[in-house]
Image: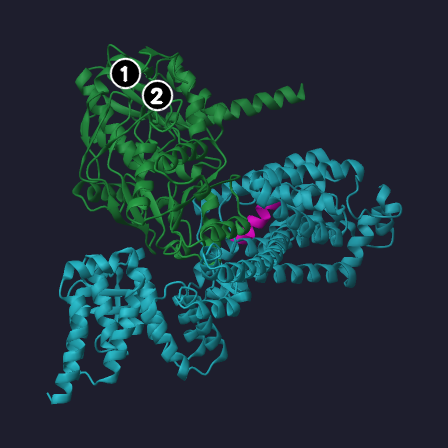
Chain colours: A green, B cyan
Amino acid sequence: MNINFKKMLAGALMLSTSFVVTQAFAASHSKETIKVGVLHSLSGTMAISETTLKDTMLMLIEQQNKKGGLLGKQLEAVVVDPASDWPLFAEKTRELISKKKVDAIFGCWTSVSRKSVLPVIEELNGLMFYPVQYEGEESSKNIFYTGAAPNQQAIPAVNYLMDEIKVKRWVLAGTDYVYPRTTNKILKAYLLSKGVAEKDIMINYTPFGHSDWQSIVSDIKKFGSTGKKTAVVSTINGDANVPFYKELGNQGISSEDIPVVAFSVGEEELSGLDTKPLVGHLAAWNYFMSVESKENEEFIKTWQAFIKDKKRVTNDPMEAHVIGFKMWVKAVEKAGTTDTDKVIDAMIGIEVPNMTGGTAKMLKNHHITKPVLIGEIQEDGQFDVVWQTDGEVAGDAWSDFLPGSKDLISDWTAPIKCGNYNTKEKKCLATAK
Amino acid sequence: MSHGHLFSFGRGVFFLAPIFSNQDVLVMSFFSMKNRILPFLIISLILLFSSSSFAETTNSESFKQALELLQSKSYNKKGKAIEQLVITKDERVQPILEAMLKARLFYTKEDKITVIGKKHDDGFSLVSVLDQKDLGVLSKSKLKKIKVNNKLRGVLRASIATLSLSSPDADKRLSAVKQMLGKTNDTGIAFLKAHLKSEKDTAVREKIETLISINDLNSSDKAVKLAAIKTLFNDLNPETRNQLETLKDSDDAEIATASQNALKNIQKKLGFYEKVNTVFFGLSLGSVLVLAAIGLAITFGVMGVINMAHGELIMLGAYTTYVIQQIMPNHIGLSLVIAVPAAFIVSGSVGVLIERLVIRHLYGRPLETLLATFGISLILQQAIRSIFSPLNRAVETPSWMSGALEINPALALTYNRLYIIFFCLAVFAFLYLIIKRTSLGLSVQAVSQNRSMARAMGIRASRVDALTFGLGSGIAGIAGVALSQLTNVGPSMGQDYIIDSFMVVVFGGVGNLWGTLISGFTLGIANKFMEPWAGAVLAKILVLVFIILFIQKRPRGLFPKKGRAAES
């Protein structure tokens, strides 16, 4: 009895807190509203990255409401906290769609959280915008991928190292989970196709939050001392980066000797660490805060005013959310309704300006066009763009360099309407997983 | 201008001509892969000019021009400016290049004066480069940084190296020669040979001679080649190895066998140093494990409290370091020293608080203690998230803790790890003395062996409990100071260490400090020896499996408590 009572009490407490949270956002608009779900972890390990995206969404919704809302209605943010707990992402999605009746969800960061949401969002025919660079090999009717696919980040970065820096030996270092593993598989296949010998590629995986990099860095040093130019392509995630770069610095490996190009280190991450050992190392993104353009300047100004912090930085996934949100607004206006199927159809072909002076276009495969930028880390935690693609690169859901996905394309327009259409056999494989 | 001057000027122009006549070619060659040659072009130019007295005005004129060029946006132009600066041989040049490398070279947005800045509260205190005039403090927004990229950094380092070859400081000359390793060409070697005649420092001489020998490996003269192989027989530089690798398949049998022998010898030595290196890595990983676990050895080992908030006490120590660094941003080294007692006090008092408020009521109920302390750990994490934000905080490393102690080209011990090994041993000694030599330690031992008997002897057991827990927690805080130098300081950093800490304590034998020390180092070294062939992920798993098996065989760890106390 006692335990049951405690359980009930705990349940009641949790319910009431979530009630208070959602009520707080709902309170001001009692009239009919369009609800936008925000599904980002506000606690747990991913809070470090995802809290910012929640704030970005709140800012965008506030801005849109100031402009008069959407279809004559006010927008309303429904914020939930999946707490960096992957199965909870699925539950919260169900709650957002079935109970809260949201019309679109902006959310997720890690690939595993997206994979957890995927079956639910397809089952309930919802709509989600996913703002983070990812490993590709996926395309769902109900998800729009506004972050970079591998061909919009990893492959151009490798091209840059190969052509401009003349790198001959490659270290592919990553954290041990799905994004680095898939990306490195693609990169390895790509490098081999470019004539790089197997012995000139070193692949290394480390656990999450790895902090003792001594032997790995010493291995990299040995690998790089054969006289051929060596570079590290890093898919090392989150916290593990700091001790990695520190160890590089301490063992005397400078960015001139062995440059490291990272896919997961952005302005936000750099603001939390001592940047001295990182100066000169590279990162590949589709947006940098230091890019000079009218849109970007304005965005930074509004963001810093909204968050009330003049030193707060912006980053790539934030830009992706801005683009995704603007596209959704345009599509809803075009369709004249928030009905999921109509909005999904209206989304394709929508163009909005991105923040690097170009245009982002939603493609048939639910990915967008993006420029690719390579930046060098500066001491103030900002990036200095050293190279960029001539124009925007179209996102490719299925990599051309993996045997299993070479012949697959994704096309959500009639007549194909399929996330994994095999162009050779001319048929759609089962529903995208 | 006198005839002599004209002549020397003419000579200078003659040598400059091929470089400056075609800017495109210059830029290309400057930034091509062959840009290693550049420093030596510069050296040869310096040599030329140093023999003749260049007209003062021309020099300062070109110095000024170069400064203006430095403010341009194009990296190619900046590269040219650096080159021009080096040629002037002006004594102001080296500080400029060093400032540029450290991103401390600016120009004022208003008057376009090139200045070297020093961090000062919310701006930079500035000194003009041209006339060394103090310009006071300016805010960051009024300055434009002269940015560098990787290629320029390489050029800067090489230029600084050549400039510091004439430095009176032998250490600087030594590092200059090291910089040139693997980046030499004939001009450079000729210059080094010339420099060797006037060089007095033996270490620098040796380094230069090695460099010349490595270059001789490329010589077309067979005798020279063989002599070079002989002198480099014990040399561990990777450049030597790479050269010998190409020579071992030489058509000339004599050279091939000689280089094969040399390679074999070098490989043998390398293998040895690699082992030494791995042991060092293991010791340093072990010292981190011991530091994290030793506080737990007190609270868990001696008191028997399963404290899941131990990691968060470590985190508090790390955040204390961060706060103290924020208070005194200009004394990074000193702040670290102050942080040690401060972290001890902060974490220690939190520990005492936890003991008084929660754990006291739960003695003898391990499951409840585990749950309660787990709850406390979550509360502490979220509290830090609310106070400091969920983002990681940057804790700076003082300069004496970065870099490495280079014993030879194959073996370099990083300073931060060295310090932490010693720090760990010092903390261990400190704790050991407290337990063995003070009256508190005596009471702790008495209470942990037999609580009721100790109370009967007049020991206030509850006070001893609080102090012991505080001591263990304080030590965890000290560990946090050390860890802030190795890894991230963030709200969940403690989580990474809690499992490892328990592992070390259980393996070492509950209630035994020596056991903790030895088990920490054993696990560290074992992990590092396994990592190269098993990978970091598998190595960790293997260590865990090994411990599980070990505990099955010896449930009380390496050094179990003996006697009657063990049974309780």
Asked whether B314 falls inside the magenta stretch, the response is: yes
Q: Is residue B169 above or below residue A80?
A: below
Q: Amino acid at mark 1?
A: Trp
Q: What x and y, as percent, mark residue B318?
A: 53, 53
Q: Nearer the viewer, residue A356 or B265?
A: B265
* Residue identified by numbered label 2: A139
Q: What x and y, as percent, mark residue B408?
A: 54, 65
Specify whether residue B118 is in view.
Answer: no
Q: Is residue B21 above or below residue A294?
A: below
**Chain label for disc 1:** A
**Chain label for disc 2:** A
Q: Secondary structure at mark 1?
A: loop
Identify the residue shown where x is 45% and y is 33%.
A181
Name the side, left or right, on which B381 lies relative to B443.
left
| Furthest-right residue in this view | B564
Q: Nearer the viewer, residue B528 or B294?
A: B528
Q: Secondary structure at mark 2?
A: loop
Q: Which mark is residue A412?
A: 1
Q: What x and y, as percent, mark residue B419?
A: 58, 62
How far is the residue under mark 1 from the one under mark 2?
Answer: 9 Å
User: Magenta region, mostly helix, strand or loop?
Assistant: helix
Identify the residue shown where x is 62% and y is 52%.
B282
Q: Residues within 10 Å of mark 1 (few under 14, many from 20)?
A: many
Range drawn in magenta: B309-318
Contact? badges 1 and 2 (CB < 8 Å): yes
Q: Is residue A354 above or below residue A69?
A: below
Q: Is residue B169 above or below residue B226?
A: below
